[in-house]
Image (cartoon, rainbow, N blue to C red):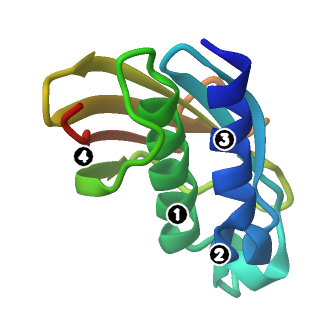
Amino acid sequence: MTRDKAKLAKQFIEAIPHCKALNMTLTSIGDGVAEMALPYDVRTVGDPESGVMHGGAVLALMDTCCGAAAMSHPSSPTATATIDLRIDYMRGATPGQTLRTRAECYRITRSVAFVRATAMDDDSDNPVATATGAFTVESK
C-alpha cells in the first residue's frame, strides 16, 4: 500500500465527527486491512446496570474500520461509502475494556468492495461481534 493512501485513510477517519466524539483510533492500516480501537467510556454504555457498551458504538467502530479497509485496498479509490453492513452480536463487550476491530477487504469488483470484520475486547478470545459488508468503489 502506498504511504499516501494510508495517510489519506487516517486523515479521513480523524475528520469524521463521530470518530472524534467516541475517541476511535486507527491502530493499523495496509493493503486492504485496517485495525481500530474504541476505548471504554461511560458515554458509550448501553445498559447502565451492567455497564455494557451500546451496540450502536460497536457498529460505528466496525463500519468505520470496514470502510478504512476498503479504502486501503490496492484496487480501491480513496473514498468509499457503506452500501450494506450486517453485524452479528455474539456477546456484550466487557465493561471497562477497549474494543478492537480488525477488518479485511477480501474482494473488489468494478463497483463494490466486500469486507469482513471481527470486534474483540481484552477479556476473551471470543468475538464481541462479527460483520460483513459491501462498500462503494468508484469506477476509474
Task: Give whichever of discs 1 and 4 has the lower sequence position.
Answer: 1
Nearer to me, 9 or 53: 9
Amino acid type of disc 4?
Answer: Thr
Q: Are marks 3 and 2 in contact (CB under 8 Å)?
A: no
- Nearer to us in this view, 14 or 106: 14
Q: Quadrant of residue 123?
A: top right
Identify the residue shown where x is 69% and y is 79%: 45
Q: Residue at x 48, y 39 (%)?
A: 78
Seen as rendered, the residue at the extreme left is 110
Residue position for label 3: 8
Name the spot of residue 109 as percent of width and height, x first: 14, 23
- What is the spatial separation of the Cα atoms under label 3 and label 1, in whole angstroms? 20 Å
Q: Nearer the viewer, mark 1 or mark 2?
A: 2
Q: Position of residue 55 (x, y in %)?
A: 49, 68
Disc 3 secondary structure class? helix
Query: Quick one: label 4 or label 3, which is nearer the N terminus?
Result: 3
- What number is the disc on residue 60? 1
**106 lies left or right of 22:** left
Circles 1 and 2, Cβ within 8 Å, touching? The answer is yes
Residue, x 24% and y 17% (percent of image)? 107
Closer-to-camera residue (19/50): 19
Q: Residue 43, located in which quarter of the rendered image?
A: bottom right
Front disc: 1 or 4: 4
